[in-house]
Amino acid sequence: MDNLGALESLLKSNMNKYAKKKVCEKCKGTGFIIREDNSVDYCDCILSSKDSLLKAMNIPKRYWKIADSMDAFYTEDQDGSYTNAYIAVLDYVNKFKENEGRGLIFMGPPGVGKTYLSIFSLLYLEEKYKIRGLFYDVRSLILDLKSLIGKDRHLNSSSYEKLLTKVLKAPILVLDDLGSEILTDYNKDILTYIIASRYNDMAPIIITTNFNLLQYDIRPEQVGLSSSPSNKKQRSEIQISSKNMFEKNGPEQGKVFSYDDLPNSLKSDLVLRLGESIASRLGETCDFIYMFGEDRRINKSKKTKES
């Protein structure tokens, strides 16, 4: 057989193998399994690689690099509030199974690292406990649900119901940029339903929301940290001291605040932005983390243009 014939034979053999490849019997190709207790778990067939895991958790590709080092301190010019938030996340993960149903809310202006740390939280929970959470930008979630309304009506379980069940039953759910969406009746109803359902099931939520804390007279000093950027030595010391956070009684604790600690003006604006029902449930089940600083995305863009 000449070289061309050998190549054709190899191609046909590979095509036949591909054609015979079976769809996963467990999930029927959907990527996740709905169990008898109506809980949702990701199928092993899509978790054979890191990329598949990140896709299954719906983590945006821009943030996949977090999984490479699993260390949130490999960024420049971290300020004191970021350091505090990072340590608070480590403490949260360390005590996750002890504090059933507790969640976190990152509050601060855009571009200070709230989304980054919320994803970091998901990945550390997966690494430590193999808990596979779910990330969703709130506006994208609402649009995805709206796009599925009325589809697959001939099926017993519609695509809409599958997505909603996936969100409701995820072991840990990140809702990114909550409050930025327009609060129409549908948006309010679906968000209230999701948060109320998870509240009743004691299923934790991690939330990011944009607030200019200085407008409420909330300052970096309230978390016992300077608002000026930490130098490399300080970051290195924090990094070393936080290595034992996954052991009991770790050396550091990030400062967090309860709903009662928030200024009344901020509570009122939370109610206006999210609705009283949502604000009340989140206030009971979540700890609040203040974050300050300049918008890193804008600063990064400026540096790129200057260079």
Image (cartoon, grey):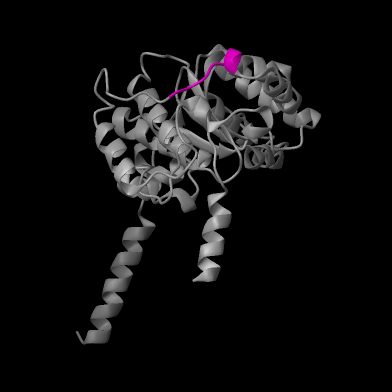
Camera sees residue 48: no
Q: Is 249 placed above or below 21 here?
A: above
Q: Residue furthest left?
A: 1
Tell me which residue sits at (67%, 28%) in the image: 216
Return the x and y of residue 83 as percentages of the image width and height.
41, 36
Q: Is residue 18 left or right of residue 272?
A: left
Q: Is residue 245 magenta?
A: no
Quarter of the view holding residue 25 = top left
Camera sees residue 51: yes
Quarter of the view holding residue 123 = top left
The segment highlighted magenta reads: 255-261
Q: Nearer the viewer, residue 307 or 159?
A: 307
Q: Is 140 placed above or below 100 here?
A: below
Tell me which residue sits at (50%, 42%) in the image: 113
Q: Is residue 205 left or right of residue 2?
A: right
Tell me which residue sits at (33%, 42%) in the image: 235
Q: Nearer the viewer, residue 223 or 56?
A: 223
Q: Quadrant of the N terminus?
A: bottom left
Return the x and y of residue 256 as percentages of the image width and height.
48, 22
Return the x and y of residue 103 as percentages of the image width and height.
49, 22
Return the x and y of residue 217 as percentages of the image width and height.
64, 28
